[in-house]
Image (spheres, rainbow, N blue to C red):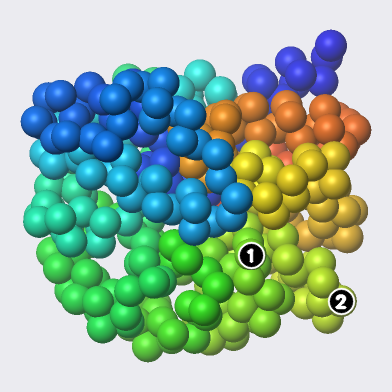
């Protein structure tokens, strides 16, 4: 009975969540109504029952459809405030939010509408709930590197509003090296760099995120276990892995949470963290991820403290700020 209480209340950072993946079906319908958008689902219940995924792509198709109700700055603000209030209730003291500008600019939504709505929410959430929040702009890897460069150029007038660059969407067939030049440019501009790698893709993709993209964290990275040398490299460099247990379960990466390799990655000395990825789609926010993966794998208090400390130290908050949390 003590372990769940510890998991719920310990201060933690959430480093891998897509803000568009926090859109609950109720909010999707409310925004559709507010904006006059027609959805291909009759009800909240019908939409929710479509959340039966077989792999990453089957999720992404529904996730991009859900995001189609976001049109105005207030929509992005409302979405992010709903997530940040929920995160603060989970004792998240620091949240780093991915956002996918191309999902919106491709529909004609100006990038400043996206960035300014999300940024205002990060600011107001800090004032209201004391949570520190920052944004990471993610390129969609199923689109071209040229499109990523165009997105970066469009976002640069608003560069004060985001701290880093990420890479998400369909992994297989879109290796990190496809984005080597745009990531080099982002590094030169002083952004933090992260990338999804080794979610469904092979260890080779994790190697190229490290070597070609020069990332500071690997998002997911759970397939690294298949490569002994990679495991050594990750352990020796204390490279953070932002692992998302419920996401991995729902997308059939580890269909049975009892088989999840998080305890083994941790025992091998990797800098593992626990995150929710897309909480509205995968059945839980960050504390649900801790509670369920602990219950399924039998980890204990020592691992709980380690995971929480890892998350705070792997964040891009200043060392002084981190020291106040640890
Ligand atoms: N993987 C890749 N792209 C994504 C994900 C994910 O888990 N969630 C939202 N976009
Ligand atoms: Zn993700």
Q: Is residue 208 left or right of residue 163?
A: right
Q: Residue at x 74, y 29 (%)?
A: 292
Q: How many marks?
A: 2
Q: Are marks 2 and 1 in contact (CB under 8 Å)?
A: no
Mark in front: 2 vs 1: 1
The verdict on label 1 being within 8 Å of ligand 1 is: no
Query: Which residue sits at x=68%, y=44%?
Result: 249
Percent x, y of residue 30: 22, 22
Residue 217's place in the image compared with 142, above or below, is above
- Quarter of image, res 19: top left
Q: Which residue is mark 2?
A: 228
**Measured along the vertical axis of the image, is residue 83 above or below residue 261?**
above
> Which numbered disc covers residue 141?
none
Q: Which residue is mark 1?
A: 200
Secondary element under disc 2, as helix, strand or loop, is helix
- Circle 1: element type: loop
Viewport quadrant of the N terminus: top right
List x then y, in percent, for residue 224: 75, 69
Could one spot residue 22 in this view of the protein? yes
- Mark earlier in primary sequence (2, 1): 1
Q: How far, Cα to Cα, is label 2 from label 1?
A: 18 Å
Estimate the x, y position of residue 129 in percent, counting from the top left.
Answer: 39, 21
Q: Is residue 120 visible?
A: no
Q: Position of residue 241 (x, y in %)?
A: 66, 58
Q: State the image quarter where residue 187 is shown.
A: bottom left
Residue placed at 41% from the left, 71% from the top? 141
- Toward the viewer: 195 or 283? 283
Q: Report whether 163 appears left or right of 94.
A: left
Q: Quadrant of residue 258?
A: top right
* Beta carbon of the mark 2 residue lies under 8 A of ligand 1: no
Q: Is residue 85 left or right of residue 307?
A: left
């Amino acid at each position: 009975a003590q372990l769940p209480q510890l998991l719920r209340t310990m201060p933690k950072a959430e480093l891998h969540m897509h803000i568009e993946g926090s859109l609950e079906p109720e909010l999707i319908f409310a925004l559709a109504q507010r904006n006059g958008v027609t959805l291909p689902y009759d009800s909240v219940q019908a939409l929710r029952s479509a959340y039966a995924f077989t792999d990453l792509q089957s999720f992404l198709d529904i996730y991009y459809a859900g995001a189609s109700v976001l049109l105005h700055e207030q929509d992005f603000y409302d979405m992010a405030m709903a997530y940040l209030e929920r995160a603060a209730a989970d004792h998240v003291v620091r949240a780093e939010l991915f956002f996918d500008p191309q999902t919106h600019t491709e529909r004609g939504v100006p990038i400043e509408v996206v960035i300014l709505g999300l940024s205002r929410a990060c600011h107001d959430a800090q004032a209201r709930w004391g949570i520190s929040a920052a944004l990471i702009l993610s390129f969609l890897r199923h689109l071209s590197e040229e499109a990523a460069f165009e997105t970066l150029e469009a976002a640069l007038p608003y560069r004060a509003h985001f701290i880093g660059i990420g890479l998400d969407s369909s992994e297989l067939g879109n290796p990190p090296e496809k984005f080597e030049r745009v990531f080099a440019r982002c590094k030169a501009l002083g952004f933090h760099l992260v990338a999804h790698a080794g979610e469904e893709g092979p260890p080779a993709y994790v190697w190229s995120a490290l070597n070609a993209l020069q990332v500071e964290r690997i998002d997911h990275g759970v397939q690294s276990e298949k490569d002994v040398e990679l495991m050594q490299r990750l352990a020796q460099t204390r490279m953070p892995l932002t692992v998302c247990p419920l996401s991995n379960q729902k997308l059939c990466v580890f269909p049975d949470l009892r088989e999840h390799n998080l305890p083994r990655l941790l025992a091998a000395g990797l800098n593992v963290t626990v995150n929710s990825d897309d909480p509205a789609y995968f059945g839980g926010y960050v504390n649900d991820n801790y509670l369920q993966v602990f219950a399924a794998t039998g980890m204990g208090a020592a691992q709980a403290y380690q995971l929480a400390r890892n998350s705070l130290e792997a964040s891009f908050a200043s060392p002084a700020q981190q020291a106040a949390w640890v």
